[in-house]
Image (cartoon, grey):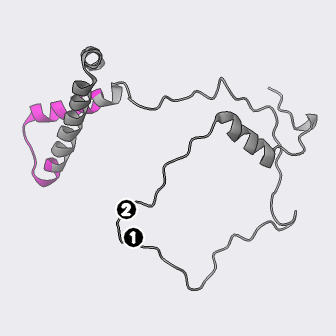
């Protein structure tokens, strides 16, 4: 089946080179078919094997098609763990913070009047800034004894 799917991916890449809109439209229609088929299957048992074969093919094809959008960053080449030190952080060295749940009256926030989403967009930071913040919080007091020997 992989050879058949690879041919589909190859044809999709030609389509994507010609027109990205048509390629996106194909992905949307394929996903709609999969969703609709799965919905109908819950309501009525379909006995047409060609519809099932198309659904299985489209699921496998969509998994293999190139993803559009954000690129994944391989951190293995960028980062390496050199030192490791286990240390308890908290109020004091013996007890730490109390994280138990407390009883009492609380406030449950519901939907706003405008029914808009309260989720803000994710702010992206540079990797160097994130590493610096982690080192500022957790990188205190590392010595040669804490160095990892591989």
Q: Quadrant of residue 123?
A: top right
Magenta span: chief secondary structure: helix
Residue 115 placement (x, y as % from top left): 35, 66
Q: Looking at this view, is 36 or 137 the one in front?
A: 137
Can you identify the residue that label 2 sits on? 116
Residue at the image point whose x is 81% and y is 58% from the top: 89
Q: Is residue 129 left or right of residue 28?
A: right
Instruction: Spot the residue most to the bottom.
Output: 104
Q: Secondary structure at mark 1?
A: loop
Span shown in magenta: 40-61
- Judged left or right of residue 81, residue 146 is right
Check whether the beta carbons of the residues at disc 1 and disc 2 lie within 8 A of each other: yes
Question: Residue 108 appears at what percent x and percent y?
Answer: 48, 76
Residue 122 appears in the figure: yes
Mark 2: which secondary structure?
Answer: loop
Residue at the spot x=29%, y=15% of the render?
A: 17
Q: CA distance from mark 1 to mark 2?
A: 7 Å
Residue 26 vs residue 116: left or right?
left
């Amino acid at each position: 089946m992989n050879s058949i799917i690879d041919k589909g991916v190859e044809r999709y890449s030609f389509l994507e080179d010609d027109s990205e809109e048509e390629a996106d439209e194909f992905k949307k229609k394929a996903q709609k078919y999969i969703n609709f088929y799965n919905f109908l299957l819950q309501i009525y048992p379909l006995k047409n094997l060609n519809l099932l074969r198309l659904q299985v093919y489209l699921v496998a094809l969509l998994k293999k098609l190139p993803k559009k959008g954000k690129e994944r960053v391989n951190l293995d080449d960028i980062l390496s763990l050199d030192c490791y030190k286990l240390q308890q952080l908290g109020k004091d060295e013996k007890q730490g913070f109390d994280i138990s749940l407390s009883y009492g009256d609380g406030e449950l926030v519901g939907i706003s009047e405008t029914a808009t989403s309260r989720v803000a967009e994710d702010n992206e930071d540079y990797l160097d800034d994130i590493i610096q913040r982690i080192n500022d919080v957790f990188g205190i007091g590392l010595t040669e004894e804490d160095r990892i020997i591989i």
